[in-house]
Amino acid sequence: MNDKLLLELYSPTGEIADYVQAIWFARAQFSGESWLPCDGAKGVIFLISGQLNLAGKPLNQPYSMQTISTQSEKVTFTAGSIFCGIRFKPAGHAHLQKVNHSLVAPTTLAGIAQALDQGANLDSFIDLLSAHFNAPKIHLQTIEHTQKLIHKIINLTPLNTAYEHTPKGKRQLERYVKNTCGITAKHLARIYKVRQAKQLIKEYPQLSLARLALECGFSDQSHLNNEFNAILQITPAKYKKLIHQ
């Protein structure tokens, strides 16, 4: 996140990777703040020690469920804070709940929180979770179709094309995505279009914002500015200056 926070990430493999995008572990060397990226998904945070605020609200032990991320949110932490978590993919948490997966059961999360202590690290956190990574998977067509559509949206397939290449009718798919993501497919597509613009600003600082808008499919620079600011809480010009100063 920044030089005040030591952050480690692990991307799971196997069937659980259909639902979980990352396992992470953080230690704060100093008090500070950072911004969590917006991804249209949910997460769970385990606070081991210290004080942690997310979007101005304190997160308490043993664990907190993050709401669906539709805007970037500020996280503040005190020196010595230790916290870790699971970041789900869009609709991932809802899908695991639907099949009664042990990883998202309240008793599982409470047990993991109880087992974590100040000597914990990323490896020991993964060990606590790993027993649940290979729980039997129940195949449900509605989940599989929704995942297929969401995968296409995340990979920036134009929305109409994504609908055409996914089984089931558009109206059914819209309902599935809204019910499991908590936001519409169109809103999810907006988020990932802005994430693409953010990545291109990092990789190609010489690219003008007007050109960037065209590359990412925005109608013009003003459209890019409005969407970027609405989702990331900063204008593209300010973000560009911030990371390339």
Image (spheres, helix red, strand yellow):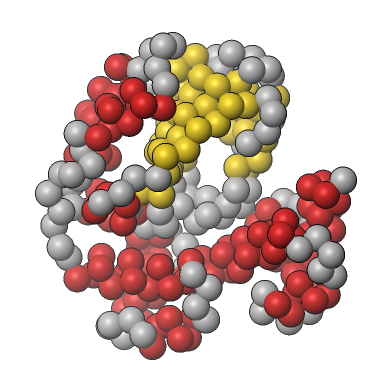
The image quadrant of residue 138 is bottom left
Q: Is residue 56 left or right of residue 44?
A: right
Residue at x-position 19% and y-position 34%? 131
Count of number-bearing discs: 0
* Residue 52 in view of the camera: no
Residue at x-position 58% and y-position 63%? 191
Percent x, y of residue 162: 43, 81
Q: Is residue 214 left or right of residue 21?
A: right
Percent x, y of residue 130: 25, 35
Percent x, y of residue 37: 60, 48
Percent x, y of residue 7: 55, 31
Q: Is residue 99 left or right of residue 7?
A: left
Q: What is the quadrant of the N terminus in the image?
A: top right
- Height in image: 143 above or below 71? below
Residue at x-position 68% and y-position 17%? 30
Residue at x-position 30% and y-position 17%? 115
- Height in image: 39 above or below 110? below
* Residue 241 in view of the camera: yes
- Height in image: 245 above or below 114? below
- Height in image: 91 above or below 136? below
Asked whether 199 or 51 is in front, the reply is: 199
Q: Is residue 9 left or right of residue 208?
A: left
